[in-house]
């Protein structure tokens, strides 16, 4: 149920799906562990990478464009002094490469320095920005992270750290998993809906807060626990421990289901669930709900792999084989700016293995269909390679609406399933049959109540108050009265 006029998705600013990290170390510099953690989070953003450290006196920063390995060299790491640090990898919006939005975002003010790394997207940025502008703040970007930084800086002038964060949280509406550094104090903040993941780890001589547990594993650390929705976690400056403050207690969460389906690494554990196992369970349920008898089941590499292994496990007597080979040197097709480039990129990226496919009926499994470019091209490729029939099975429900919480899901007019008509999608991608998993199977596989998940991109009903869109709960943006 839509409520009329729909705003452009970028009206809330350019912050997108990203990876964040914060480190407080007892004995060593924070730069190197932060850098390695960013490597572990590279899948969450390839447009830019940045680290800001603090040595007890001042901040040091280095932000570069591209992958972590391109953005930093040894010399850059050597200049990042101090045992506290935060880092960020930024996810590209379709076609845009923009240095002004690279993070961490830094600001100096009377009460010290602040650095922020943000994953998610606020939906009340405009209202907050105009309120702060009225109060004399000047902004250099149109992003939401700068707005959070100014609001927090303003509150820090009047209150202690915990109270300042609480006040700022009361004014933010939307999705935010943040690592923040105030002078040399590193913090993690997770929005009250827990929309994006954020997790605490213990290192041999320090603590880390990161978007995903895979970053903690990479550092040889131990997972302590997830940052709870609505919680502030403050690491001790000497890296010896942390304090936690439950600043907001929502009745319901709104965890993003797409983290489990596509975005997070399969080896990460989010809110207690191993992503790989969730995907395999989705694959098993996909077979239960919409299994089809074919000679062979094959994944779209790499996104469909875990789903296909679960599906094949549930399907009796079916061959499970690789039918498509991936050229690992080609990046995500999604980030190509034009449709033509995206189509060519699919063929650059994937090539069929003829012997698996020729004269056989094939079930092709992927995580999701967004614009439909990948599936259409792959069905064509498999037919050209001699497949008798091609059945497509998808581990997410149809994506019918945009994401305002930081994933680039394309606009409604680009989404192949925007009308919610599976038959029409089947025809457009040229498959012999197409089936998607149900939303309830998604909730069951994640082990979370359907009402505690954000499925806005599936239902078009959101857990936040977004102008022109329907909500899935009783929710309103905060009134900004001071
Ligand atoms: P499409 O070709 O537009 O239908 O995109 C679907 C393919 O892109 C699937 O194979 C997914 O694994 C992948 N994908 C889905 N969502 C995203 C996203 N937000 N960003 C990048 N890739 C995505």
Image (tube, helix red, strand yellow):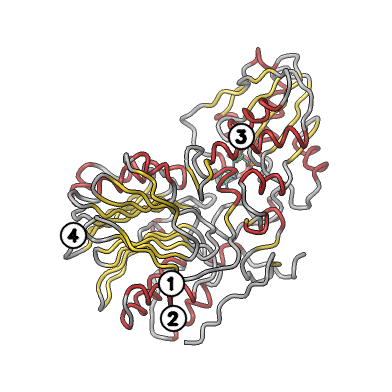
Residue 315 coordinates in the image, percent (x, y) = 72, 25
Q: Which residue is mark 4?
A: 55
Image quadrant where residue 468 sits: bottom right
User: How would you rate the neighbour count of disc 1 (Cα within 10 Å): few for under 14, some for 14-19, many for 20 or more?
Assistant: many
- 128 versus 351 height, above or below: below
- Name the residue at 44% across, 81% down: 132
Compare marks 1 and 2 and give the one earlier in the sequence: 2
User: How would you rate the neighbour count of disc 3 (Cα within 10 Å): few for under 14, some for 14-19, many for 20 or more?
Assistant: many
Compare marks 1 and 3 and give the one earlier in the sequence: 1
- 330 on left or right of 415: left
Q: Are marks 1 and 2 in contact (CB under 8 Å)?
A: yes
Compare marks 2 and 4 and give the one earlier in the sequence: 4
Whether the residue under disc 4 has CB within 8 Å of ligand 1: no
Q: CA distance from mark 1 to mark 2?
A: 8 Å
Q: Which residue is mark 1?
A: 147
Q: Which residue is mark 3?
A: 280
């Amino acid at each position: 149920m839509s409520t009329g006029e729909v705003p452009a998705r970028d009206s809330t600013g350019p912050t997108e799906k990203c990876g964040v990290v914060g480190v407080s170390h007892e004995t060593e510099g924070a730069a190197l562990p932060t850098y390695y953690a960013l490597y572990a989070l590279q899948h969450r953003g390839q447009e830019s990478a940045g680290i800001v450290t603090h040595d007890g006196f001042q901040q040091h920063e280095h932000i570069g464009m591209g992958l972590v390995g391109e953005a930093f060299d040894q010399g850059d790491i050597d200049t990042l002094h101090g045992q506290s640090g935060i880092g960020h990898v930024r996810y590209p919006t379709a076609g845009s490469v923009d240095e002004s939005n690279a993070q961490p975002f830094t600001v100096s003010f009377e009460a010290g320095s602040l650095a922020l790394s943000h994953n998610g997207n606020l939906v009340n940025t405009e209202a907050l920005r105009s309120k702060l502008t009225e109060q004399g703040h000047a902004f250099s970007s149109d992003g939401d992270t700068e707005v959070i930084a100014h609001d927090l800086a303003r509150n820090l002038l009047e209150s202690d750290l915990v109270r300042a964060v609480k006040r700022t949280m009361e004014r933010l509406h939307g999705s935010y998993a943040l690592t923040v550094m105030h002078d040399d104090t590193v913090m993690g903040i997770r929005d009250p809906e827990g929309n994006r993941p954020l997790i605490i780890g213990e290192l041999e001589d320090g603590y880390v807060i990161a978007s995903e547990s895979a970053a903690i594993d990479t550092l040889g650390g131990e997972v302590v626990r997830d940052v709870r929705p609505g919680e502030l976690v403050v690491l001790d400056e000497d890296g010896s421990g942390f304090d936690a403050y439950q600043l907001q207690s929502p009745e319901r969460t709104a965890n993003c289901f797409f983290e489990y389906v596509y975005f997070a690494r399969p080896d990460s554990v989010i809110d207690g669930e191993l992503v790989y196992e969730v995907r395999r369970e989705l694959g098993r349920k996909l077979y239960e709900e919409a299994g089809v008898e074919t000679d062979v089941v094959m994944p779209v590499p790499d996104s469909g792999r875990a789903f296909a292994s679960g599906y094949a496990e549930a399907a009796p007597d079916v061959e499970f084989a690789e039918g498509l080979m991936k050229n690992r040197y080609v990046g995500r097709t999604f980030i190509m700016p034009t449709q033509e480039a995206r189509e060519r990129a699919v063929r650059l990226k994937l090539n069929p293995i003829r012997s698996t496919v020729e004269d056989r009926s094939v079930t092709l499994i992927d995580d999701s269909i967004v614009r439909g470019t990948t599936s259409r091209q792959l069905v064509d490729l498999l037919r050209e390679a001699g497949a008798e029939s091609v059945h497509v099975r998808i581990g997410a429900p149809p994506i019918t609406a945009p994401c305002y919480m930081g994933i680039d899901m394309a606009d409604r007019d680009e989404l192949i399933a925007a009308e919610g008509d599976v038959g029409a999608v089947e025809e457009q991608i040229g498959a012999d049959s197409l089936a998607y998993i149900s939303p309830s199977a998604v909730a069951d596989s994640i082990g979370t109540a359907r009402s505690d998940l954000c499925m806005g991109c599936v239902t078009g009903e959101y857990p936040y108050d977004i102008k022109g869109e329907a909500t899935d709960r009783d929710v309103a943006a905060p009134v900004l009265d001071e």
